[in-house]
Image (tube, rainbow, N blue to C red):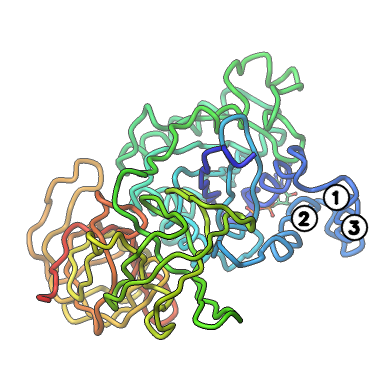
Amino acid sequence: QGKQVQLNLAIVGHVDSGKSTLSGRLLHLLGRISNKEMHKYEKEAKEKGKGSFTYAWAMDESSEERERGVTMTVAVAYFDSKKYRVVLLDSPGHKDFVPNMISGAAQADAAVLVVDASVGSFEAGMEGSGFGQTREHAQLIRSFGVEQLIVAINKMDLVAYKKERFDFIKTQLGSFLRSCGFKESYVTWIPLSAMANQNLVTAASDARLSSWYRGLCLLDVIDSLQPPLRDVSKPLRLPICDVTKLHTLGMVAVSGKLEAGVVQIGSKVLVMPSGEFASVRSIERDSSACSTVRAGDNVAVSLHGIDPIHLIPGGVLCHPDFPVAVAARLELKILVLDIKMPIIIGSPVEFHIHHVKEAARVVKIVSVVDQKTGKVSKGAPRVLKSKQNAIVEVELDGAVCVEEFTKCKALGRAFLRSAGNTIAVGIITRIFEQNA
Ligand code: GDP
């Protein structure tokens, strides 16, 4: 154990499409939730008159238990496939899930888009007021630069596992996904039933499905994903999620996910944005001590030789010779979500990136772009409306640690909020660095 590559998988899709059921099922089938626990959830769910929600229930319950909070912010559960340690992002049990879903999606290497195949439900996910959540989530995931997508066409039991229904959904949603900029070769379609356990971790047993579907089951599709690039050869980047003062005098621990490079006991690190140096005293990975950690690992690192006031969530541990950028003006490529008020120049927003948020304003709308081709379709518009893709510039009240998305995904994915709603998501395309 421990040698496996970590794959952060976001489970997204319309409310009630079966995200929790699917996640709960996978965790149970792969031994992460015991039969005993499962029976307990079953009993509780039945008592509450929610028998059909057993697996979803398990997800809700275990998410709290699993959330030890030391090294991960959003991850609630994981299982091991042949190739990966698959971390399921987001807390699918929550109905008010858009913000959760976004913070989960911001860490995703790949995503499973769960679609309810039953007649009417798929259609509702595609239409509805606003975007239709299926469409909205697909666009959102793509706007965060996620390229690999598994479309889990769920509840096939409700449509008698009919190939025609699967093909219909694939055609409809497929053309939409292409218009979002997903490449066909990076999208895998799979018919399944989370409830009836068809096509999850083994080939379907129901002849109505196995008679025509010859592809991989979900677990094997996950294994067929391209491994995420974890650049150990790039300079160290450890965005700080949490800071804990230790009892030992002069020691302080920081935790987060190592996004690039390597850390060893004895390493000298540069702490940004303060510009102070510190030395690594000890390292924990998945709660056990070790001497070296590398990109992709969730770690806690204890430091000495630094005043704890210089360590804040949102800071970044860097290679001493390669500090991360600290900037207050940024260019972003965004997708505008469903908004009531258009975004205009001067619109106040709350800027969120890795483990930090900062008050900001939109100071320039550079252009509107076509999500599929990336081409500018309208130069310098005055307002931005729902569903538009655009290049904008934002000015932050205070500088934050950032990097261009193409250099470091985790430090280059951001979202904008206003009055309690997420209004746009996107990536950093340009940094206006502050003069040192
Ligand atoms: P979520 O909101 O996307 O997390 O959806 P849930 O997992 O809570 O599921 C919503 C409802 O759909 C629950 O009543 C589930 O039991 C049901 N459900 C989920 N998957 C399936 C499936 O494959 N077949 C059928 N028939 N029902 C399902």
Compute the Cα span from label 3 to label 2.
12 Å
**Callout 3 crowding tier (Cα within 10 Å): few <14, some 14–19, many ≥20:** some
**Hey, which quadrant is residue 378 in on the image?**
bottom left
Compute the Cα span from label 2 to label 1.
7 Å
Instruction: Report the mark closest to the observer, 3 or 2.
Output: 2
Compute the Cα span from label 1 to label 3.
12 Å
Residue at 46% x, 54% y: name it.
132
Instruction: Look at label 1 and name its amino acid.
Output: Met
Instruction: Look at label 3 and name its amino acid.
Output: Lys
51 sits left or right of 280 in the view: right
Instruction: Look at label 2 and name its amino acid.
Output: Ala
**Mark before the other along the chain sequence, 1 or 3:** 1
Residue 38: mark: 1
Instruction: Report the mark closest to the observer, 1 or 3.
Output: 1
Count of marks overlaid on the render:
3
Residue 46: mark: 3
Residue at 25% x, 83% y: name it.
398
Q: Nearer the viewer, residue 83 or 105?
A: 83
What residue did someone put label 2 on? 58
The image shows residue 319, relative to residue 316, as above or below, that is: above
The image shows residue 48, relative to residue 251, as above or below, that is: above
Q: What element carries label 3?
A: helix
Contact between marks 2 and 1 (CB within 8 A): the answer is: yes
